[in-house]
Amino acid sequence: MKAKKRVVTARPTARTPTVRKIKPAIVPAPRVAASARPSPSLDKPARGSRSSVVAVAPAVDALGGGEVDLSVDLGRGLVLPNPILVASGTFGYGIEYGDVVDIQRLGAICCKGTTLKARIGNPTPRVTETPGGMLNSIGLQNPGVDAVIEKYGKTWSGWKVPVIVNVAGESIADYVECARRLDGQPGVAGIELNISCPNVGKGGLQFAIDAEAAGAVTAAVRRATDLPLLVKLSPNVADVRPIARAIADAGADALTAINTLSGIAVGPARSRPLLGNIYGGLSGPAIKPVALRVVYEASQVVDIPVVAIGGVTELADVLDYLAVGAVAVQVGTAIFADPTLPARLVDELGAECRRRGLDDYRPLIGTALPKRAGPPSAKGVEYRP
Ligand SMILES: Cc1cc2nc3c(=O)[nH]c(=O)nc-3n(C[C@H](O)[C@H](O)[C@H](O)COP(=O)(O)O)c2cc1C
């Protein structure tokens, strides 16, 4: 492992306090109007408004209030300017959206899943719309880590917005080698491990569904790089808590939760499943209650920051995730319907803090968690809640 170094950061601040130390907010969050239902268009930017960059004015100017500190420390020097990130696979490599939105206003960009070698992805069809969301089975189509570094690294290094590279693999050696190649590369602010991948060494069982395998891959990558390391939890498990703990114990700097839920759709003639890969990952508003539960459970058993992902379409979703212990959120599927949403959420969160008389957003974190951590129960997975 190389010597410790600082990576791309915004303003350094004190490390985000753990949720247990945070005081509850005084004013309840209002619900805001529901935004448009996401309509997926594969993992490409929405067309239509490409000619003009939507520069969302800082909320501070719009409302004339004082500046709100939205910065968030994800550990190991990765300090984001705000807690609104974009989720892997829904924002390309960031570049694709440069003429649609002011990407520099985002908290961070998690780029498309990246593997050691290039992958052509799954057979088509790869996406389909579902009630309240979408199913995708892109299959990690990407040009491989070396090509990603060569193609995008220089551009990323000139950006204010940190870029976190989402890494996937089929063996621990894959993940380790990918992380090694990213280590020290200009423009790479951190790594997010997508461990929802079949582990060839364990007979095809996903790393993410086994605490031992999740801990082993995290520990191996931790030894290989000094980059901030985020590890993404899968919801497709009976109990996420031992897995979250194993990942934290293995040296991850933060958890992100959740990846998609496994699902299928049936083809029009009902003669076979619709997706070319049969199985797809469900995302969008439909998965938010599941993601809330996972974030709620994980944030009570680890002391590292938890970043929430799942069906964010409006400010109320962000506030809900903060309330159950997330320090930040990622926006995914909703970007296909409205690429300007993440930057707008930054403004709306700042405005919401000012409305509540807060000069930073941290008092919003953990307000819906139990006041005292109780013993773990099976409530999250039992048949009758
Ligand atoms: C088209 C598509 C591609 C995705 N690709 C990846 C990926 O490469 N790596 C990864 O970790 N997650 C990937 N995801 C999962 C998202 O990052 C996110 O965890 C999930 O969609 C839940 O968030 P959402 O409901 O806001 O979309 C993908 C999701 C979609 C919809």
Image (cartoon, helix red, strand yellow):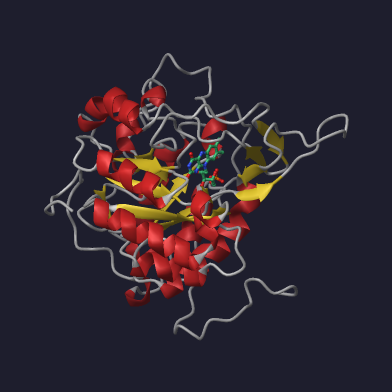
Residue 241 or 60: which is nearer the viewer? 241
**On screen, residue 318 above or below 15:** above
Name the residue located 39 percent from the left edge and 44 percent from the top edge: 174
Q: Could you say where residue 272 lies in the image, as x and y percent from the top left?
A: 82, 35
Which quarter of the rendering shows the C terminus?
Answer: bottom right
Name the residue located 34 percent from the left edge and 29 percent from the top edge: 148
Residue 191 or 35: which is nearer the viewer? 191
Q: Could you say where residue 298 lies in the image, as x and y percent from the top left?
A: 47, 68
**On screen, residue 204 above or below 55:** below
Res. 285 visible in picture: yes
Name the residue located 40 percent from the left edge and 43 percent from the top edge: 167
Left or right? Give the position of 208 relative to 154. right
Residue 336 or 56: which is nearer the viewer? 336
Outermost residue, top side: 51
Count of residue discs? 0
Q: Could you say where residue 123 lies in the image, as x and y percent from the top left?
A: 64, 28
